[in-house]
Amino acid sequence: MTGGTTVIVTGSTGFLGGFLTAALLRRGCRVISLVRPRNGSTPWQRMGRLMDFFGLRPGDDLEVVEAYLDEPGLGITEELAGDLRERADHIFHCAADTSFAARRSDEVLRTNVQGLMNVYGILSGSSHFHHMSTAYAAGAREGTCMERLEETGAFHNDYERSKHIAEVEITGACRRDGTRLSIYRPSIVYGDSVTGRSLRFSALYYPVRILLFLRDGFIRDIRERGGSRAEELGVSMGPDGSVTMPMTIPHREGWMNLIPVDHLVRTIMELMSSGAEGIFHIVNHRQNTLDDLLDLIGDHFGLDGISSVTGDRPGGPTPLEVLLDGYIKLYYPYMTDRRRFDDSGTRKRLDGMDLVCPQLDAASFGRCMDYAVEMEWGSRLRI
Amino acid sequence: MSEALNTARQCRHYAMCKIDYLGGGLCPGARDRYFVSFYPQGIMDIYADAAQGRIPVTPGMVDVAEACTLCGKCDLQCHFVTELRPTKAARGLKELVREHLATRDPVEAPADPVLEELRAIVGPGWATNDPAHLSAYSDDPCPISTKTLPKYVVLPGSTDEVAETVELCRRRGLEFTVRGNGSSVMGFVLSSGVVMDMARLRRMEFDEANWCVHVGAGISSYELQREAFGRGFLVNTAEPAALYCSNIICSGIFSLFSSALGTGADNVVDAEFVSWEGRHFHLSDREAPNHFAFVRRDMRAPGICTAATVRLHPLTGDESGIAVPFGDFDEALEYSRDLGRRGLGLGIGMLGVEYTATFMAPTTELARGMRRVLPQKLGIDYLVVVLGDPASLKAASELAPAVMDADMMRCLMLGMNSLTEDGVAEILEGLEGEDLPCRLLARPGMLPVLEAVLDPSPGNLAASVDEDMRDLYTDIYGRPEMTDLFLMNVFRTVSSRMGREGHVVAFIVYVPLDDPRAVWELHRAFEDVAGRFGVRGDLGFITPIDRGRMGVLEWDMYLDHTDEEEADRMRGAMAAAGKMLEEFSSGDPRFLWIRYLFNQGFCRKESFLYYQAQGK
């Protein structure tokens, strides 16, 4: 990647797309962001807030185009589409719907498959097409997942399914048209390991957020209302302010594959610069376990009583566990994962570069979570 | 426009200021005066007309202005359903009258021989042609009606006086119309001749031995229900401020209780009428006209109903309510129908989000928050409310995918302020399990968790209203009838909130519940009409009747009736909805628009629900 390269980016106002857009601009690329208006904000206002977040003051090197990826023509004129095709050296498709909820599966499939193919259909020309996928497009399985398209029919949710279908479809289309294609498969991405900053607070943040939400509710109940509800559920508060919430989380002796967004972006930038094509796993070889995470939460936030349990909970879930399950059950496959991701292709491409993925530790966890709390889990960060 | 005039023009004419539904007492200025002019509703109309120069200051207006004590009772009553404060208009009227009287006398209405004849019938104080009083009977918020000033307003005190007034009108060639509580949601109660107000026919005699009550035409549904309930009985009533007899004759009474108690003639033991010729008759007379039959065309009322004897239904005293949440129309409808088929519950209603949110929330802002939270965060698109004794609720619960019981509903209502906060709403949104979030929250044992999070209490809910009203709201929401699903439906204290954000146009249709797709198509057709005309609208409710074979569906459209452009769009939407309904029912006669029941409320439900079976 060199200065002057023109990259069309979708999903710039999202988490990964936002960090990627900032990195491209910092490298001197010209970025054309396809953005839709949202919540009364224009695409330009949204991108302005994104630039403020990153402390960037782009000039002509950032161009914002109002576009709607769910429309076959992206909601742009043929003339503009032709102009974009002409100018783009790379197209980076980051836009995605990351919901795991079954009730939203239609939207997820539409956004992640149809949206991708709309972008490809309208904008692909001689440019290099980059697709942000996920390591979990491999589907529900155990063992090692390779950096290639593999047949699979089982998925933990429709998000995984949609990303798998999207990979198949974009690969087929690019093969047919002779388009250069790179597919990036990150594992679970969290905030910047150095600064703690993030644009989204889902995935790793979800269990922390719900636990703190419940903790705060019980603290209010204990301090302001006599604590009868807390007592009923076995919740107590120590003299030091620490709260004990008796809860267990089912464990199947797997692990969590977590990567910070700074590592993801650095890796992608290097892969893009190398001109590499193919499928790339961007994962962590130093994995965390569910127990690690519970320890980090307990130590950082003064929360006790939460532990993992192998197999079913004896006596069934308590009301607190029902709620916790409802909130993060869809994440359990990723918190106790038994998949391993072969990334030999990626490592081979990056051979000689100092790109070691940092492990989530107490320091980086603290930075990321403190930032999330400061940003009120995103309420103060509307892009 | 002054704040006082703006307030006055916003009156919804629901007459909630004429019933003591909050227990704080009625407007003292209106006591024993009966004319709607003396109630806040009348004061608002009179002030709006006077402030816009439509009527002069008259002796009647002076009486009205002087009668008002500015006690503020109406502010709470009106605020509770519309967030309006009528004392602003009352102060405006007092000021306007004071300024006029400082320099001039009031303008007397001209002497009128017809008025004298009317007064000879009803007494000098109960007939008037004073423009101020006429103003209070000239408005009808129905968007297709035009403000019409009558020549006379008459308040008969007996059936004989009604008959004599009718006879006089016939003799003088005067058109007349009969009003219940001052106006009606349906409209069509305007006349350029005589408006007869039934408010003085106040007879209410209970015959508990025979499980019935004799009700005069001036008794409101609320008054009747409150008295019956105190005696351990339930009456199938609908809108609380509607006068009960007029409500029957208008369309027959349908409510959530109609699933068990029926509609039309089901609850009528007898009724007393004055025919359009001025003749008395009772429905039970062998020679009486047959008002139990149904004719599928626009019909005039069979006469003036001056009293009715209606059934009392004994209560067990342990009735309560549950709410069953659904994200799918067909599932909710099938559940409602199934309950009807099994004869479970004393009342059943499938409510849309608009109804649920609007009824639950004490303010517009909270209602808007709930309209967002219910479907988007909790996954509730429809709520089936089931009312009944513990045994029937247990059976209904066993058939339900999830149940929000009375305690949980109370928690959600009193915790609404927290529930609609961004932080909590986002947490709820994170409930991405395979089932609806509301079903997860409805699991056994979840209540203390919700209570810890939402901190439900009357005081917390009251924090959403204006500061000077908070103590009053705290007191009101501490009462069970504000949060208990059963009592909320018995007294219907919150149902008038449907008009809080503007006036409502309600479309009522009898629908075949055994064909959920067809009912869904009708729902979509209404959505299409509302969408085409840019009118806000939603499914109100569907209640199964006739053991779940049929249902009564209400679909509502909302407008600011003081906005001419909006009223124009509503007129268009009403015409389009009417055309759609005609097409719908001509293609499928199982659908019956209530337009064809209008004025036939005393007919047997079998006459219209089994219309085809009669070979008609």
Image: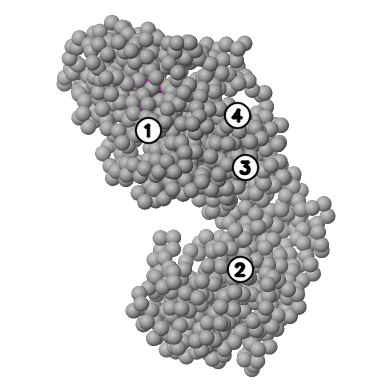
Which quarter of the rendered picture does the N terminus of chain B lie within?
top left
Q: Outermost residue toward the bottom?
A: A352
- Which disc is residue B335 wearing? 3
Question: Residue at label 2?
Answer: A159
Indicate which disc, 1 or 3, sits on the residue closer to the N terminus: 1
Which x, y percent locates residue A214? 66, 53
Question: Residue at label 4?
Answer: B260
User: Would you say residue B546 is visible in this rendering?
Assistant: yes
Report how far apart the C-alphas of labels 4 and 2 lie in the structure: 46 Å
Report how far apart the C-alphas of labels 1 and 3 lie in the structure: 35 Å
User: Which of the pair B458/A240 is nearer the observer?
Assistant: B458
**Do residues under tags 4 and 1 come within 8 Å of each other at their CB atoms?**
no
Indicate which disc, 4 or 1, sits on the residue closer to the N terminus: 1
At a point 36% along the width and 77% down the height, the residue shown is: A78
Q: Answer yes or no: are tags 4 and 1 on the same subunit.
A: yes
Using the image, name the chain to which the residue with label 4 belongs. B
Local SS, label 1: loop
Report the number of numbered marks: 4
Which x, y percent locates residue B369? 49, 48
- Would you identify the image quadrant in which residue A209 lies? bottom right
Residue B302 placement, left or right of B256: left
Q: Which residues are magenta?
A: B179-186
At a point 54% along the width and 21% down the height, the residue shown is: B267
Local SS, label 2: helix
Name the amino acid, label 1. Arg
- Tag in front: 2 or 3: 3
Q: Answer yes or no: are tags 3 and 4 on the same subunit.
A: yes
- Structural crowding at the residue carrying mark 3, measured as other residues with C-alpha within 10 Å and reported as few (<14), some (14–19) or many (≥20): many
At a point 50% along the width and 80% down the height, the residue shown is: A92
